[in-house]
Image: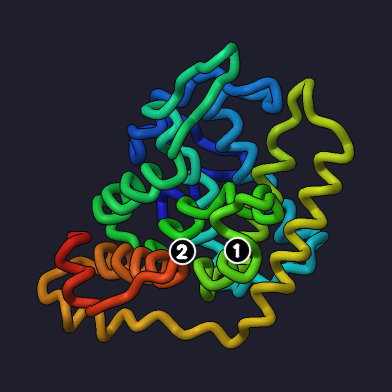
Amino acid sequence: MALLDALGPPPDEAAILRQIPELGPSRGLEQSPYHHLDTFGHTLEVVRRVDEELRAGSLGARVEAGRVEGLRLAALLHDVAKPVTRGELGGRVLFVAHDSLGALLVRRICRRLGIPALHTDMVVTLTALHLKIGFMEHPESDYPPERLALAAGPFGEELAVLSWADRLAAQGPRLKDEHIERHRRLCVRFLRASRARDPHPAPAYGELARLLPGASESDVGYVAACARLVAARGGGGDPLALAGRLL
Protein backbone atom coordinates (compact mmCIF):
# COMPACT_ATOMS: atom_id res chain seq x y z
CA MET A 1 0.00 0.00 0.00
CA ALA A 2 1.41 3.38 -1.02
CA LEU A 3 0.27 4.94 2.24
CA LEU A 4 2.26 2.49 4.32
CA ASP A 5 5.30 3.07 2.12
CA ALA A 6 4.93 6.77 2.94
CA LEU A 7 5.26 5.96 6.65
CA GLY A 8 8.93 5.22 6.04
CA PRO A 9 11.24 5.38 7.71
CA PRO A 10 11.70 8.21 7.11
CA PRO A 11 8.06 9.30 6.85
CA ASP A 12 6.94 11.25 3.79
CA GLU A 13 4.65 13.74 5.51
CA ALA A 14 3.36 15.32 2.30
CA ALA A 15 2.37 11.93 0.87
CA ILE A 16 0.67 10.93 4.12
CA LEU A 17 -1.39 14.11 4.22
CA ARG A 18 -2.37 13.81 0.56
CA GLN A 19 -3.89 10.41 1.25
CA ILE A 20 -5.31 11.21 4.68
CA PRO A 21 -6.15 14.92 4.73
CA GLU A 22 -8.02 14.34 8.01
CA LEU A 23 -4.59 14.36 9.68
CA GLY A 24 -3.78 17.85 8.41
CA PRO A 25 -5.38 19.75 11.33
CA SER A 26 -3.23 17.77 13.77
CA ARG A 27 -0.11 19.62 12.59
CA GLY A 28 0.77 22.17 15.24
CA LEU A 29 -2.05 20.99 17.52
CA GLU A 30 -0.76 21.33 21.07
CA GLN A 31 -1.24 18.49 23.54
CA SER A 32 -0.91 18.06 27.29
CA PRO A 33 2.38 18.43 29.23
CA TYR A 34 2.72 14.64 29.11
CA HIS A 35 3.55 15.04 25.41
CA HIS A 36 6.63 16.59 23.85
CA LEU A 37 5.35 16.74 20.27
CA ASP A 38 2.34 18.22 18.54
CA THR A 39 -0.41 15.78 17.60
CA PHE A 40 0.89 15.00 14.12
CA GLY A 41 4.46 14.61 15.34
CA HIS A 42 3.21 12.33 18.10
CA THR A 43 1.32 10.24 15.55
CA LEU A 44 4.44 9.71 13.45
CA GLU A 45 6.41 8.90 16.59
CA VAL A 46 3.84 6.24 17.53
CA VAL A 47 4.34 4.63 14.12
CA ARG A 48 8.09 4.66 14.69
CA ARG A 49 7.70 3.19 18.17
CA VAL A 50 5.45 0.43 16.83
CA ASP A 51 8.11 -0.50 14.29
CA GLU A 52 10.73 -0.42 17.03
CA GLU A 53 8.69 -2.67 19.33
CA LEU A 54 8.04 -5.15 16.55
CA ARG A 55 11.81 -5.46 16.12
CA ALA A 56 12.72 -5.46 19.83
CA GLY A 57 9.84 -7.52 21.22
CA SER A 58 10.21 -6.06 24.71
CA LEU A 59 6.59 -6.90 25.60
CA GLY A 60 6.73 -10.37 24.12
CA ALA A 61 3.72 -9.60 21.92
CA ARG A 62 3.16 -11.97 19.02
CA VAL A 63 2.03 -10.03 15.94
CA GLU A 64 1.62 -12.10 12.81
CA ALA A 65 3.38 -10.83 9.70
CA GLY A 66 0.09 -10.45 7.84
CA ARG A 67 -1.19 -8.05 10.48
CA VAL A 68 1.73 -5.63 10.62
CA GLU A 69 0.25 -3.37 7.92
CA GLY A 70 -3.00 -3.08 9.86
CA LEU A 71 -1.13 -2.29 13.07
CA ARG A 72 0.92 0.44 11.39
CA LEU A 73 -2.25 1.93 9.92
CA ALA A 74 -3.85 1.89 13.39
CA ALA A 75 -0.82 3.73 14.76
CA LEU A 76 -1.28 6.38 12.07
CA LEU A 77 -5.01 6.81 12.66
CA HIS A 78 -5.52 6.22 16.38
CA ASP A 79 -5.60 9.96 17.21
CA VAL A 80 -7.27 11.15 14.00
CA ALA A 81 -10.18 12.69 15.94
CA LYS A 82 -8.04 14.81 18.26
CA PRO A 83 -8.37 17.99 16.18
CA VAL A 84 -12.17 17.91 16.39
CA THR A 85 -12.32 16.98 20.09
CA ARG A 86 -9.68 19.27 21.60
CA GLY A 87 -10.80 21.41 24.51
CA GLU A 88 -9.47 22.94 27.70
CA LEU A 89 -10.85 22.74 31.22
CA GLY A 90 -9.16 24.39 34.17
CA GLY A 91 -6.00 24.84 32.15
CA ARG A 92 -5.91 21.17 31.13
CA VAL A 93 -5.89 20.11 27.48
CA LEU A 94 -8.52 17.43 26.85
CA PHE A 95 -9.56 15.31 23.87
CA VAL A 96 -12.83 13.93 25.14
CA ALA A 97 -14.14 10.91 23.19
CA HIS A 98 -11.42 11.11 20.55
CA ASP A 99 -11.17 7.33 20.72
CA SER A 100 -14.83 6.58 19.94
CA LEU A 101 -15.21 9.40 17.42
CA GLY A 102 -11.92 8.33 15.87
CA ALA A 103 -13.36 4.88 15.21
CA LEU A 104 -16.11 6.51 13.14
CA LEU A 105 -13.60 8.55 11.15
CA VAL A 106 -11.49 5.44 10.59
CA ARG A 107 -14.46 3.73 8.95
CA ARG A 108 -14.75 6.57 6.42
CA ILE A 109 -11.01 6.64 5.74
CA CYS A 110 -10.73 2.87 5.33
CA ARG A 111 -13.65 2.84 2.93
CA ARG A 112 -12.07 5.59 0.83
CA LEU A 113 -8.73 3.78 0.74
CA GLY A 114 -10.27 0.37 0.03
CA ILE A 115 -8.83 -1.25 3.15
CA PRO A 116 -9.71 -4.97 3.52
CA ALA A 117 -12.13 -6.18 6.19
CA LEU A 118 -9.46 -7.63 8.51
CA HIS A 119 -7.38 -4.48 8.62
CA THR A 120 -10.41 -2.20 8.92
CA ASP A 121 -11.67 -4.33 11.81
CA MET A 122 -8.27 -4.07 13.49
CA VAL A 123 -7.88 -0.33 12.99
CA VAL A 124 -11.41 0.45 14.22
CA THR A 125 -10.94 -1.83 17.24
CA LEU A 126 -7.54 -0.44 18.18
CA THR A 127 -8.63 3.16 17.70
CA ALA A 128 -11.67 2.66 19.93
CA LEU A 129 -9.63 0.90 22.64
CA HIS A 130 -6.19 2.50 22.47
CA LEU A 131 -6.59 4.32 25.81
CA LYS A 132 -8.14 1.46 27.75
CA ILE A 133 -5.05 -0.48 28.87
CA GLY A 134 -3.81 2.56 30.76
CA PHE A 135 -7.03 2.77 32.79
CA MET A 136 -8.03 -0.87 33.09
CA GLU A 137 -7.02 -1.19 36.77
CA HIS A 138 -8.95 1.90 37.83
CA PRO A 139 -11.85 0.87 40.09
CA GLU A 140 -14.32 2.75 37.86
CA SER A 141 -12.88 1.55 34.56
CA ASP A 142 -15.46 0.57 31.95
CA TYR A 143 -12.94 -1.93 30.59
CA PRO A 144 -11.28 -4.07 33.28
CA PRO A 145 -8.75 -6.56 31.86
CA GLU A 146 -11.13 -9.42 31.10
CA ARG A 147 -13.69 -7.21 29.37
CA LEU A 148 -10.96 -5.42 27.45
CA ALA A 149 -9.62 -8.76 26.25
CA LEU A 150 -13.11 -9.67 25.05
CA ALA A 151 -13.49 -6.31 23.27
CA ALA A 152 -10.11 -6.57 21.55
CA GLY A 153 -10.87 -10.14 20.51
CA PRO A 154 -8.26 -11.46 18.06
CA PHE A 155 -6.35 -8.16 18.15
CA GLY A 156 -5.06 -8.27 21.71
CA GLU A 157 -1.41 -8.58 20.71
CA GLU A 158 -1.70 -5.58 18.40
CA LEU A 159 -3.54 -3.51 21.01
CA ALA A 160 -0.75 -4.08 23.53
CA VAL A 161 1.90 -2.99 21.04
CA LEU A 162 -0.04 0.14 20.06
CA SER A 163 -0.70 1.11 23.67
CA TRP A 164 2.96 0.66 24.58
CA ALA A 165 4.13 2.65 21.55
CA ASP A 166 1.64 5.40 22.38
CA ARG A 167 3.03 5.64 25.91
CA LEU A 168 6.65 5.75 24.74
CA ALA A 169 5.84 8.40 22.14
CA ALA A 170 4.73 10.84 24.86
CA GLN A 171 7.87 12.15 26.57
CA GLY A 172 6.65 15.45 27.98
CA PRO A 173 8.00 17.22 31.08
CA ARG A 174 5.41 15.63 33.38
CA LEU A 175 6.31 12.09 32.40
CA LYS A 176 8.17 10.09 35.04
CA ASP A 177 10.01 6.80 34.81
CA GLU A 178 7.41 5.17 37.04
CA HIS A 179 4.68 6.10 34.54
CA ILE A 180 6.48 4.16 31.82
CA GLU A 181 7.17 1.15 34.03
CA ARG A 182 3.56 1.08 35.23
CA HIS A 183 2.31 1.11 31.66
CA ARG A 184 4.64 -1.69 30.66
CA ARG A 185 3.28 -3.77 33.53
CA LEU A 186 -0.29 -3.03 32.42
CA CYS A 187 0.47 -4.07 28.84
CA VAL A 188 1.97 -7.35 30.01
CA ARG A 189 -1.01 -7.98 32.30
CA PHE A 190 -3.39 -7.29 29.44
CA LEU A 191 -1.53 -9.72 27.19
CA ARG A 192 -1.99 -12.41 29.84
CA ALA A 193 -5.71 -11.65 30.04
CA SER A 194 -6.04 -11.73 26.27
CA ARG A 195 -4.15 -15.00 25.90
CA ALA A 196 -6.27 -16.57 28.64
CA ARG A 197 -9.20 -16.24 26.22
CA ASP A 198 -7.36 -17.90 23.31
CA PRO A 199 -8.45 -18.96 20.83
CA HIS A 200 -10.57 -15.89 20.16
CA PRO A 201 -13.47 -16.42 17.75
CA ALA A 202 -12.43 -15.77 14.17
CA PRO A 203 -14.21 -12.75 12.64
CA ALA A 204 -17.09 -13.95 10.45
CA TYR A 205 -16.44 -11.58 7.55
CA GLY A 206 -17.95 -13.91 4.97
CA GLU A 207 -21.17 -14.30 6.93
CA LEU A 208 -21.42 -10.56 7.49
CA ALA A 209 -20.82 -9.91 3.80
CA ARG A 210 -23.74 -12.19 2.95
CA LEU A 211 -25.91 -10.30 5.44
CA LEU A 212 -24.84 -6.98 3.91
CA PRO A 213 -25.15 -7.33 0.13
CA GLY A 214 -23.28 -4.57 -1.64
CA ALA A 215 -21.30 -3.52 1.43
CA SER A 216 -17.62 -2.79 0.94
CA GLU A 217 -14.99 -4.88 2.69
CA SER A 218 -14.26 -1.87 4.87
CA ASP A 219 -17.90 -1.68 5.97
CA VAL A 220 -17.86 -5.39 6.78
CA GLY A 221 -14.77 -4.91 8.93
CA TYR A 222 -16.35 -1.92 10.66
CA VAL A 223 -19.49 -3.88 11.51
CA ALA A 224 -17.41 -6.79 12.82
CA ALA A 225 -15.49 -4.45 15.12
CA CYS A 226 -18.62 -2.73 16.40
CA ALA A 227 -20.43 -6.02 17.02
CA ARG A 228 -17.49 -7.24 19.12
CA LEU A 229 -17.34 -4.00 21.09
CA VAL A 230 -21.09 -4.11 21.75
CA ALA A 231 -20.89 -7.76 22.83
CA ALA A 232 -18.08 -6.96 25.27
CA ARG A 233 -20.32 -4.40 26.94
CA GLY A 234 -23.08 -6.97 27.37
CA GLY A 235 -25.00 -6.17 24.20
CA GLY A 236 -25.92 -8.53 21.42
CA GLY A 237 -28.89 -9.24 19.23
CA ASP A 238 -29.32 -9.99 15.57
CA PRO A 239 -26.16 -9.15 13.54
CA LEU A 240 -28.21 -7.99 10.55
CA ALA A 241 -30.24 -5.61 12.70
CA LEU A 242 -27.03 -4.28 14.23
CA ALA A 243 -25.50 -3.87 10.79
CA GLY A 244 -28.52 -1.93 9.61
CA ARG A 245 -28.05 0.55 12.42
CA LEU A 246 -24.32 0.92 11.79
CA LEU A 247 -24.27 1.37 8.01
Task: Please name whichever residue, 84 or 193, is drawn nearer the observer in this view of the structure.
Answer: 193
**From this viewpoint, which residue is outermost toward the right?**
177
- Dot 1: within a 10 Å radius of its alpha carbon, few (fewer than 14), some, or many (20 or more) residues? many
Q: Which amino acid does label 2 sit on?
A: Met
Residue underneath mark 2: 122
- Dot 2: within a 10 Å radius of its alpha carbon, few (fewer than 14), some, or many (20 or more) residues? many
Q: Which amino acid does label 1 sit on?
A: Glu
For the point 43% across and 39% down, which residue is it? 97
Query: Could you tell me residue 16's position as x and y percent?
Result: 43, 38
On the rendered image, what quadrant is the C terminus found in? Answer: bottom left
Check residue 158 in the rendering and tell me which mark sits there, or answer none: 1
- Above or below residue 86? Residue 52 is below
Task: Please name whichever residue, 93 or 58, is drawn nearer the observer in this view of the structure.
Answer: 93
For the point 69% across and 37% down, which residue is it? 169
- Above or below residue 91? Residue 61 is below
- Above or below residue 177? Residue 140 is below
Q: Residue 117: which quarter of the image? A: bottom left
